[in-house]
Amino acid sequence: MKILNFGSLNIDLIYQVPHIVRPGETLSAASLVTSAGGKGANQSVALAKAGAPVWHAGTVGTDGAWLRELLGRFGVNTEFIRDYDGPTGQALIQVDREGQNSIVLYGGGNLNNGKEHADSVLAFFDEGDYLVLQNEINITPYVLNKAAERGMKICLNPAPFTDEVKSWPLEKLEYLVVNEIEGQDLAGEQGTPEETLDRLTAAYPQLRILLTAGKEGAFYGCGGERIYSPIVDTPVEDTTAAGDTFLGYFLSSRVQGLSIQEAMDSASRASSLTVSRSGAMESIPLAGEL
């Protein structure tokens, strides 16, 4: 069984700041680190570090050639990453003293993926293989539909959330993975994680839905089934890539035959290690560290 992640690749500029900058404020950063990121790339690295066979597809500019090399060193298959004449996606990330972050994205190559490229990539995968998608590239609905036609199992993390997601054919998914805010946006109203999950499972009864809620843990629902996994409490250094780690370890565990509960618990342990370190994909643990 193979996993394709058709997703974003970013160059992250990470600023350590005393607090997230306010409108009209000029703030001095304690440090600046240039790092590899993008939700798609982070999730591919998490899948690879967890032991899953994963191929990443996406687009980078000449300034992002090192991203392909880095993903390869982490164990990600990179033959489906294409080059184009333009800048790679960028992320400006502020990280405050409590480890919370604020992110500004520039699409770059992530918004320059072509349908012909997607068709050629999908031809490598078969019925029963997995596809992982986010909302940081320009052709996500197209890839989703084409993968569904091939009988692939699709896992969508609709982040960053936009109202357009509501028009996507979500009924074709195997897994929908959201955080608490994304879940509320999709459900259309605020509430506790449990209330949000109830609304989502009522709206999409055929989907397996994972809802991560920070310190409140992670929640799973499918129809009337409910499963909960608490966090592993660790000192927080940087929350960047915590959700990406959770998704990667959860899906890898499922591919390896673990139960939903076992997969959630493994993902929670992995995420706890990620938040105790700074950075994005570099902070994601290897399976042996859990």
Image (tube, rainbow, N blue to C red):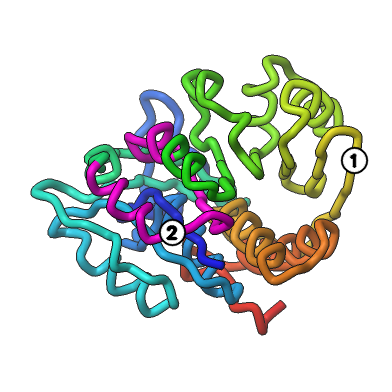
**In which quarter of the view is residue 112 placed?**
top left
Q: Dot 2: within a 10 Å radius of its alpha carbon, few (fewer than 14), some, or many (20 or more) residues? A: some
**As drawn, is 118 to the left or to the right of 133?**
left
Q: Is residue 117 magenta?
A: yes
Q: Can residue 177 be seen in this view?
A: no
Residue at image x 38%, y 30%?
A: 25
The picture places residue 7, in percent across and down from the top left corner, at 40, 49
**In which quarter of the view is residue 288 placed?**
bottom right
Instruction: Identify whether 65 is placed above or below 200.
Output: below
Q: Give the range drawn in magenta.
A: 116-143
Q: Distance between the residues labelled 2 and 1?
A: 31 Å
Q: Name the residue under label 2.
A: 125
Residue at image x 38%, y 71%?
A: 77
Of residues 25 and 82, the one drawn nearer to the viewer in this rendering = 82
Instruction: Identify whether 235 is placed above or below 228.
Output: below
Q: Please name the amino acid that badge 1 sits on.
A: Glu
The picture places residue 28, in percent across and down from the top left corner, at 36, 47
Q: Mark 1 points at which residue?
A: 225
Instruction: Identify whether 28 is placed above or below 45.
Output: above
SS type, badge 1: strand
The mark nearer the N terminus, 2 or 1, is 2
SS type, badge 2: loop
